[in-house]
Image: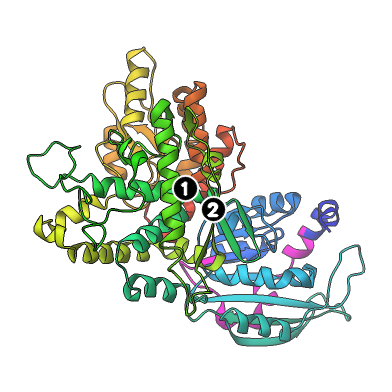
C-alpha cells in the first residue's frame, strides 16, 4: 500500500486537494474545531484537511506514514501552523511520546486500510490521545478499490463496541454518498466524545493519594517517581505491548533514591553544616515512617557509603568509579527491593490480585565503574504498568504531582519525630524539591567559562551575539514548566535575551532559525567523547523518537523541536519570538 502512494503521490495530491474540506466533511459540521483547538489529523495525506484546520486558527499535528505524501503535505501547508510527523496505526509511537491530548482527532479514509486485528489497539491509543470532552471523528469508506490498495470491511457497530469498551460516547453518525460520484463507494461518519479522561486511572491515582492507608511515605515516593519519569523521560520505555508499558526498574530506583537522599539528609538545625545528618539513629533528616524505632528498608551499608554524594549527583549521565560505583549499584538494588516488597505489593485495585504494578527484579553485579545510562538502569529489571496509567501520568502530571507533595507533607507532619523537631512547612517544601537550584547549570557554566578562557568565541544560540563579556544559561524549555537540567536543554544567551524570554518557550520559527547556532554550540561544547556520551544518553532518555544508539546532534535537535512544541501545547506555555 505504501508503494502505491509513493508511485501516485502527484495524481493523488491533485485528486485530494481538488475537493473542499467543507464538502468532504459536511457530515460532522457541528463538531468542526474552532480557534485555538489542538487537532490531530491521522493519515493526513497531502494536507488538505490539516491546512483547513490551521486556517481556522487551530494548532495541527499531521501524521502520515508515507514519506512522499508527507513531503507533499508539508509543502502544501508550509505557510500554515502544521507540524508533520511520521507515524502509523496502530503504533502511533511518535505522537504518543509527546504526551499531548487533542480536542479533535480526525481519522479520515483510513480505517478501512487497517486490518481488523489491529483496530482495537489503534482505537485504544486514539482514545488515550483525546482531551476531556475531545472528539474522535472516523470516516468509514464502503466499497472496494479498483487499484492495488488493500481494504477491509468496516462498520459503525464495530466503533460503537470499541467506544463502549474505552469510555467514549457515540454522539453522531451520518451516511453520505461519494463526493467523486463513484457508484460503488459510500461513506459513514462517526463522531465519538470523551466525557472525562476515559480510563478511570485518575480516580485510581487519587484513591492511592487520598484514601489508601500509609504507614510510610513509600507509596507517595513511588507515584512521584513515576510522574517524573513519565513527564521527563519518554525515551525510557523498554517495551510497550498488550496494553502494558515496561520501564527500567533502575530508573524508578534512581528517582526514589534522589527523593529520599534529600529528605534524609535535610539539615534541620539552622547552624548545622549543609551535609550534616540528624543524630537520631533510625531517622536522619525528616522522618519518613510512623515507626520511629525502625529504620527504612533501603537505608543500609550501601546507602551510608554514599554519604558524600548529593541527590543531584545521582543523575542520568553521571559516572562513578571505585567504591562509589559499587555503592551506587548496591543502593539502587536495595531501593528496587523495597519498591517491589513494599509499595508495589500493597497497591491494588479492588482486589489484592489486581495489582497496579509489576516488578521483575534482576541481580546486578557491582562493577568498579558505572555510567548511568538506559542500559545500566535496565539491568536492574523492569517496572511494568498499564499503558493507560502511564498515559494519565504523562498528561495529568502537572495536576498529580502537587497533590502528591501536599499529601506527602501531611503525612510527614503526622510523625512524632518531625513534630518534636519542629519541622516547618517551608522546610518540608524545600526538602521535596527535585533539584538544588544552585547546581542546575553549573556544569554548562563551567564549559562556557572554559571556552572563553581559551579564546573561543561563544555566541548566543538565539541571536548569534557574542557572550564572551557576559552571559546567562537559558533553559530552552523553562525549568518552571518542565524541570530538566540536561545538556541539550541548556544554552548560552545574552543576559538581556534570557531576562526577556523569562518562562516562555522559543517559537517554532525561532527554533528553526537558530538551528545552525544550536548545533554549533553542541558540537563545540560537547566535543570530547565522555561529554558527548553524557549528552546523548540524556537526550535519548528525555526526548521522543530517538533510538538507543543515537549519536547525531541533528537528530537530537529534531527531537528537541518536537518536545518544545509538545510542552507548549500540553502546558499552554507562551511562545517567545
Q: Nearer the viewer, residue 544 or 302?
A: 302
Q: Which residues are magenta?
A: 13-39
* 118 left or right, relative to 389: right
Q: Nearer the viewer, residue 377 or 150?
A: 377
Residue 5 in the image, given as x and y percentages of width and height: 81, 56
Q: Which residue is drawn at the image coordinates 42% and 65% (left, top)?
A: 396
Q: Which residue is drawn at the image coordinates 50% and 40% (left, top)?
A: 539
Q: Secondary structure at mark 1?
A: helix
From this viewpoint, is residue 506 visible? no
Quadrant including the N terminus: bottom right
Looking at the rendered structure, which numbered label has been put on residue 251? 1
Residue 202 forms part of the magenta stretch: no
Considering every residue shown, the one lying at the far top of the view is 454
Residue 118 in the image, given as x and y percentages of width and height: 74, 68
Query: Are the two marked residues, 1 and 2, in contact with CB atoms closer than 8 angstroms?
Result: yes
Where is 526 relative to 203, above or below? above
Question: Tell me, what colour scheme is on the image?
Answer: rainbow
Considering every residue shown, the one lying at the far front of the view is 293
Q: Which residue is label 2 attached to? A: 247
Residue 486 in the image, given as x and y percentages of width and height: 42, 39
Q: Which residue is drawn at the image coordinates 47% and 66% (left, top)?
A: 392
Amino acid at each position: 500500500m505504501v508503494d502505491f502512494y509513493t508511485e501516485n503521490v502527484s495524481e493523488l495530491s491533485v485528486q485530494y486537494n481538488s475537493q473542499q474540506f467543507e464538502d468532504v466533511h459536511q457530515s460532522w459540521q457541528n463538531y468542526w474545531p474552532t480557534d485555538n483547538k489542538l487537532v490531530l489529523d491521522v493519515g493526513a495525506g497531502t494536507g488538505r484537511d490539516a491546512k483547513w484546520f490551521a486556517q481556522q486558527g487551530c494548532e495541527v499535528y499531521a501524521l502520515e506514514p508515507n514519506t512522499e505524501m508527507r513531503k507533499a503535505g508539508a509543502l502544501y501547508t508550509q505557510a500554515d501552523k502544521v507540524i508533520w510527523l511520521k507515524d502509523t496505526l496502530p503504533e502511533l509511537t511518535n505522537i504518543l511520546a509527546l504526551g499531548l491530548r487533542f480536542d479533535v482527532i480526525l481519522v479520515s479514509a483510513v480505517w478501512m486500510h487497517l486490518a481488523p486485528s489491529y483496530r482495537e489497539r489503534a482505537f485504544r491509543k486514539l482514545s488515550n490521545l483525546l482531551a476531556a470532552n475531545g472528539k474522535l471523528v472516523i470516516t468509514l469508506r464502503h466499497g472496494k478499490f479498483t487499484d492495488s490498495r488493500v481494504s477491509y470491511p468496516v462498520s459503525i457497530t464495530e466503533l460503537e463496541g470499541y467506544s463502549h469498551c474505552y469510555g467514549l460516547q457515540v454522539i453522531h453518525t451520518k451516511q453520505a454518498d461519494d463526493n467523486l460520484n463513484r457508484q460503488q463507494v459510500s461513506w459513514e461518519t462517526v463522531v465519538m466524545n470523551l466525557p472525562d479522561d476515559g480510563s478511570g486511572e485518575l480516580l485510581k491515582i487519587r484513591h492511592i493519594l487520598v484514601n489508601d492507608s500509609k504507614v510510610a511515605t513509600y507509596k507517595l515516593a513511588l507515584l512521584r517517581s513515576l510522574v517524573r519519569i513519565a513527564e521527563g523521560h519518554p525515551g525510557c520505555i523498554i517495551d510497550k505491548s498488550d496494553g502494558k508499558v515496561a520501564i527500567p526498574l533502575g530508573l524508578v530506583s534512581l528517582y526514589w533514591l534522589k527523593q529520599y537522599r534529600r529528605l534524609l539528609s535535610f539539615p534541620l538545625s539552622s547552624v548545622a553544616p549543609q551535609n550534616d545528618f540528624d543524630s537520631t539513629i533510625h531517622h536522619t533528616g525528616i522522618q519518613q515512617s510512623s515507626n520511629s524505632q525502625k529504620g527504612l528498608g533501603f537505608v543500609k551499608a550501601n546507602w551510608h557509603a554514599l554519604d558524600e554524594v548529593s541527590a543531584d549527583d545521582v543523575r542520568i549521565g553521571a559516572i562513578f568509579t571505585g567504591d562509589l560505583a559499587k555503592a551506587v549499584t548496591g543502593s539502587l538494588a536495595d531501593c528496587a527491593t523495597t519498591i517491589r516488597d513494599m509499595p508495589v505489593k500493597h497497591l491494588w485495585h479492588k482486589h489484592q490480585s489486581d495489582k497496579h504494578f509489576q516488578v521483575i527484579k534482576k541481580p546486578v553485579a557491582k562493577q568498579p565503574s558505572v555510567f548511568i545510562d538506559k542500559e545500566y538502569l535496565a539491568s536492574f529489571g523492569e517496572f511494568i504498568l498499564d499503558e493507560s496509567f502511564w498515559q494519565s501520568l504523562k498528561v495529568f502530571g502537572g495536576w498529580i504531582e502537587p497533590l502528591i507533595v501536599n499529601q506527602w507533607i501531611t503525612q510527614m507532619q503526622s510523625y512524632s519525630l518531625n513534630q518534636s523537631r519542629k519541622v516547618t512547612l517551608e522546610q518540608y517544601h524545600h526538602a521535596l524539591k527535585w533539584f538544588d537550584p544552585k547546581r542546575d547549570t553549573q556544569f554548562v557554566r563551567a564549559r562556557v567559562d572554559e571556552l572563553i578562557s581559551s579564546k573561543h568565541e561563544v555566541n548566543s544560540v538565539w541571536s548569534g551575539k557574542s557572550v564572551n563579556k557576559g552571559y546567562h544559561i537559558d533553559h530552552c524549555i523553562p525549568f518552571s514548566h518542565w524541570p530538566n537540567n540536561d545538556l541539550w536543554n541548556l544554552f548560552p544567551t545574552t543576559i538581556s535575551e534570557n531576562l526577556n524570554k523569562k518562562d516562555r518557550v522559543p517559537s517554532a520559527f525561532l527554533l528553526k532559525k537558530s538551528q545552525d547556532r544550536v548545533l554549533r554550540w553542541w558540537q563545540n561544547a560537547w566535543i570530547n567523547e565522555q561529554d558527548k556520551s553524557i549528552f546523548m544518553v540524556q537526550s535519548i532518555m528525555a526526548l521522543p523518537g530517538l533510538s538507543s544508539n543515537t549519536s547525531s546532534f541533528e537528530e537530537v535537535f529534531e527531537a528537541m523541536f518536537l518536545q518544545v512544541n509538545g510542552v507548549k501545547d500540553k502546558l499552554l506555555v507562551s511562545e517567545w519570538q
